Image (tube, coloured by chain):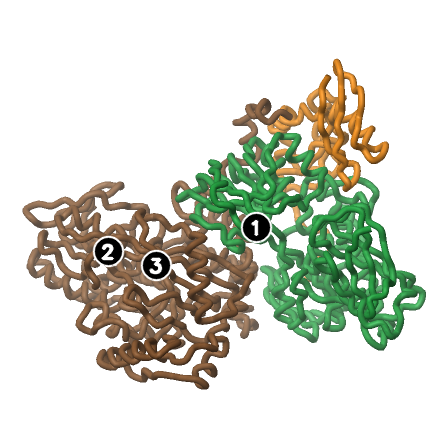
Amino acid sequence: MKQNKIICVSCPIGCRMTIQSKDGKITSIIGNACSKGIKYAEEEFINPLRILPTTVKVIGGELPLVSVKTEKAIPKKLLLEAMAEIAEIEVKAPVKIGQVIKDDLMGTGVSLIATRHIKRADSNLFSYKILK
Amino acid sequence: MKTDVVIIGGGVIGTAIARELSRFNINIILIEKEDDVAMGTSKGNSGIIHAGYNDDFKTLKGELNIKSNPKFDKLCADLKILFKRIGSLVIGFSEEDFRKLKELKENGEKNGIKNLEIIRAPKLFELEPNLNPQAKYALYAPSAGIISPYKFTIALADNAVINGVKVLLETEAKDIRIEEKQVCGVVTNRGLIETRVIINAAGLYADQVAKTVGDSFKISPLKGEYHLFDKQWGNLVNHILFPTPTKLSKGILVTPTVHGNLLIGPNSCRVKEKDDLATTKAGKQEVYAGARKLIPHLPHQDLINSFAGLRADIEGRDDFIIEASKKIRGFINVAGIESPGLSSVPAIAEMVSGILKEVVKEISPQLELNYKDDFVETLVEQPKFADYLDKIGKWQEMVEKDADYGEIICRCEKVSKGEMLRAIHQPLPARSLDAIKRRVRAGMGRCQGGFCSPKVLKILSEELKISPLKITKKGLGSEILKTKTKDMIKETGVKFKDEVKV
Amino acid sequence: MKLKYDLVIIGGGPAGLAVALEARRNTVKDILLLERDKYLGGILPQCIHNGFGIQYFKEELTGPEYAERFITKLKDCQIDVKTETMVIKITPDKRIIAINRDDGLLHIQAKAVVLAMGCRERTREAIAISGSRPAGIFTAGTAQRYINIEGYMPGREVVVLGSGDIGMIMARRMTLEGARVKAVLEIMPFSTGLIRNKVQCLDDFNIPLKFNHTITRIEGRKRVERVTVAQVDKNLQAIPGTEEEISCDTILLSVGLIPENELTREVGIELDPVTRGPIVNENRETEIEGIFACGNVLHVHDLADFVTEEGEIVGRAVGEYLKRSRKFRSQPIKIVPGDNIAYVVPQHIDFLVPGRKKIKIFMRVKKPAERIRINLLDDKGRVLGSYKKRIVTPGEMVSVYLPEVLLDDKLKNITISVKRD
């Protein structure tokens, strides 16, 4: 029988829960104050997922990096390997917010998308009305 | 490499000597082991120009301080640096203190200092409203003043370079070559410099340099810690405040700085290592306690910076060593320049100039020490945005000539890009973040470079045409950045994966 | 160059952006937004992590995405924007002096001014950590800027001081980019950051979080080489004998944010000693009529969403101010922090607003507490209102709604206190 202690992040209370399991299956969850805790504990036990926010190298842009994120959460255990894979990507400016930088990151089926615009380095930076 | 005179040490003493000797038609090389001048004691002291009542006129400390004090107005005007003759007050709390103050006054008057006065309440508290109400007396010396010691050093160096001095940074003296009891060269980490005259102004390391020629004195560093408060507090005091001195030191003082901050310190603590500049908890407590004796209500927040400086204290000797070596010809020692060293700079430089004349007569009668007729006495005024806030309309011309003067990089100290570029192209150029900081103050304000240092780094990188990865805080080994983002994960890969246990 | 505007906003971060858009919606005509950096968004473009917009947009966004929602709207609004422009001075009669490369000096006369300059990070120097002064010491925000915007990693082996959100987020960021974070130290017995960040930034990566610990000494001649850390007692003093050395080349400091009110001080506006921001009324207006403040310059917020909310309060308030349609109470009602309340914003209620039903009061507690009540007491100590809260921590802004019906003409003070339930 195994015991895992986790903290629920569904709300600021942060219930400290204990998951008891046998042969890879949950046998009991204690310490939660509500049903959100159960759902969180199950997800964390079976297959913890995380959104990965990071940056990707840009070629020819006003900035050297574009901030990106995975569109959905991906398995926690793949995070560092995903970072290594992302380190090899180079995207050409201009980049649009929401643009898919890489689909099917690490074979998860989840896309990596841009979270901001990056203009080309030689473009006129100002697109709002600037007073003369 | 060959030259007439090598000066070892780029502190305020070495650079002042360099400038003074550059009046002559001779070749001078100044070598400094760090990546900039003013890296030793010259940047870690109180910045006080003393009136000169502390020391006996028969000592060099007394004589050279007294001679130098009146010279600072013209010298600083020529070098375009700030000098404020705000006056000093030595505060006494008791009858015993009063007797000591009277002694100091008498000594000062013997030395020729005018206008020394013992002051009591109520005038004392009119001059200093925030002074400890238990204070009873003060010795007032109107001729004392404040200066930025590193700005002073940099200006001396710039002027020396304009007048032909070669300054070699990151160049350390390793050995002195001697032939038949005559200096013939200095071995550095960058090779040999042939010369027949060496001036040892190596500060904390002057004893190690002197040892190579057989002169023996031992320098034992004394550390003093300082704390600097926000400019909001600069007018907490109007003069330099000293406690009544003891035999050991002038004590922990409270003073405005020439830039408008409030400075407290130093304590005095013997340390072993000559590069031990660590601030300590005990030192902080001592400095605050000492400062509170003078100004009980010190600010409890708004601390801008804490730093330490080491004083080159010579064991068993209570005075400067400024003399030609008796062991080896062509070697001049300028050592043990602790307080009132900064205050004595102009006269020290002149004295060394005189010693050089004697040394030259002895070793190279054919070498003529002629004065140049094109010696450039002054530096060009370098307008700073922060100085134009009261006359801000005039800055418009600067921006119209050069848009870089309209781009403010350091918000806290109000420094423009134009001023930074100027600092990178000075006769002695700034090449590191700290060198920029010392010249234009970017990074010396409330946020300590939190906002501007990425910008300053970029400017240095673009202007010096070197990778941002090579930009340092204070010379080789102090690079700010490690790799480009993405290169580190490529290096370390998922090496940590097992340790990190994601 | 001389200019005239109805409204000048100093700062183009989330606060300034919200004010600009809401003021435009409230018929304020000529609006100028001044920003010192190259881009709008303030600190948001470098906050590439998630957690923004949950309250305001009911979506979870990263910092840049949150900023973009407002920047896009700005483009359609004919609001004048000047970037890379530094404000040098504000006068009590609302003249602003600013400077940039292209225009040189700008002399701007405003009818209303909004201070939205954000905050700066507390430095190593300000907390006087003993030791040497080598390269490799960064505040977390500066490190974040290098990594996410400038494109450089500032260190390989890191110790983080401070377990606020930014410290924990940077611990994860550096780990993901291949650095090794050896420990996060927190001087208090609790973290001021979200539990979610503790789990997803530290626990996920096995980064130790040590409560009741601090750095007592930094060593390294040119670059950081090691730190000495120690446990602290309840007076936050290091306990002798608990010292340990951790070798590292980088220290990240996340030891507090300080509202950047140098301009505010210089114009003569009084600052609250606890928030270190101006003292304001419910419109976030300072003691100078027509000069408002919002966002982190007013008080350090925990969520950008609340900054936006505050910006919108100010945007509307500027509209009312310019229309001259405000009614003042016969005397202001002071809101006073009581037991376990560090500060409240706004600090006073000035206006009579027909139709207003309630006023949202923000505060932070000094110490964490569970199952408590937030009590509002009048001058005589009578309970005007009482609100249950399951859990309150210093890391999260707490708010209560002050019902208009309680605001009696004779009321001078309302004291807000935390009491056990």
**Residue C415 quadrant:** bottom right
Q: Color of chain A here?
A: orange
Q: Color of chain C here?
A: green
The kind of residue tagged 2 is Ala
Whole-percent x, y for residue C413 in the image: 80, 69
Whole-percent x, y for residue A26 in the image: 79, 20
Q: CA distance from mark 2 to mark 1?
A: 45 Å
Whole-percent x, y for residue C226 in the image: 46, 39
Please tell me whether residue B410 is drawn above or below residue C67 in the rendered image.
Answer: below
In front of the other: label 3 or label 2? Answer: 3
Q: Are marks 3 and 2 on the same chain?
A: yes
Q: Color of chain B here?
A: brown
Give the side of residue C359 with respect to residue C301, left or right.
Answer: right
Density class for disc 1 (Cα within 10 Å; few <14, some 14-19, many ≥20) is some
Give the side of residue C17 with respect to residue B243, left or right.
Answer: right
* Image quarter in which the N terminus of chain A is found: top right
| Residue sitting farthest toward the top | A23
Query: Residue C236, which numbered label?
Result: 1
Whole-percent x, y for residue B289 in the image: 45, 63
Q: Which residue is mark 2?
A: B201
Q: Are marks 1 and 3 in contact (CB under 8 Å)?
A: no
The kind of residue tagged 3 is Ser
Query: Residue B49, which numbered label?
Result: none
- Front-most of A55 and B502? B502
Q: How many marks?
A: 3
